[in-house]
Amino acid sequence: EVQLVESGGGLVQPGGSLRLSCAASGFSFSSSWMHWVRQAPGKGLEWVANIKPDGSEKNYVESVKGRFTISRDNARNSLYLQLNSLTAEDAAVYFCARDLGYCIGGICSSVFDYWGQGTLVTVSS
Amino acid sequence: IQMTQSPSSLSASVGDRVSITCRASQGVGNDLGWYQQRPGKAPKLLIYAISRLQSGVPSRFRGSGSGTDFTLTINNLQPEDVATYYCLQDYYYPLTFGGGTNVEIK
């Protein structure tokens, strides 16, 4: 059974840092693109970042570039998101999600077939 | 890429057919998916590549469209379909979701 379990959320002051983790099990983690998606309280979904299976390619939404870093440890089946210079606009539930790996003719789509339950990040003084 | 969903909310009766549309500001090829988020839960994949039904999803969910205009249709609406539905384009970075459509039962 595929499982994704996020942790590391909490209350942090503006300008502070936090490291989120996502523990994966039940599938070949080292073969899967992985994503972070967030949802501010009462708002819609926002894709944050993704990372290639070997970690060699990372992509970010513009609003977090230079502040957030996605990484992974395939030996530990774990995905991470380092959040720095946090602002109130970063307060959200952060979900990790597995990519289905749907490819046609060598072109692959980003399809989130499994999601964790989310971890809440609160930014407040 | 901006993804504009409509309506933002709808109310329908059990057994009804409902449609949610998603319009992209540019063509997104086949890279359009739909997700369901029940209250207090993580999103769930329903449809990917415009019309491919994810394993285990009831066949009353149907995706269609092309280019910039896409539709999620729910046939025979059921009480468990109460949720917010989001489209997602993954043709361009950054990946972008629509604003969501809240579906309620009358």
Image (cartoon, rainbow, N blue to C red):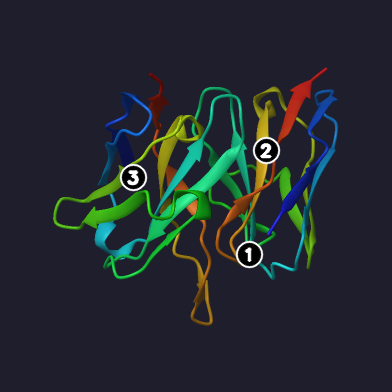
Return the x and y of residue A109 as percentages of the image width and height.
53, 66
Picture layout, residue B48 above or below residue A68: below
Query: Split into 4 quadrants, where in the image is the N terminus of chain B?
Result: bottom right
Q: Are marks 2 and 1 on the same chain?
A: yes
Judge whether residue A1 can be spotted in this image. no
Judge whether residue B91 can be spotted in this image. yes
Type of amino acid under label 3? Val
Picture layout, residue A6 above or below residue B68: above
Q: Residue A85 vs residue B51: left or right?
A: left
Badge 2 element: strand
Near mark 1 (Cα within 10 A), the count class, few <14, some 14-19 or many ≥20, is many
| Identity of the residue drawn at 77% across and 48% down | B4
Return the x and y of residue A121 as percentages of the image width and height.
39, 28
Type of amino acid under label 2? Tyr
Query: Split into 4 quadrants, where in the image is the C terminus of chain B?
Result: top right
State the CA–CA distance, disc 1 to disc 3: 24 Å
| Identity of the residue drawn at 69% across and 67% down | B28
State the CA–CA distance, disc 2 to disc 3: 23 Å
The numbered disc on residue A2 is 3
Return the x and y of residue B78 as percentages of the image width and height.
72, 27
Mark 2 or mark 3, which is nearer to you? 2
| Identity of the residue drawn at 67% across and 38% down | B85
Q: Nearer the viewer, residue B31 or A81?
A: A81
**Residue at mark 1: chain:** B
Q: Are marks 1 and 3 on the same chain?
A: no
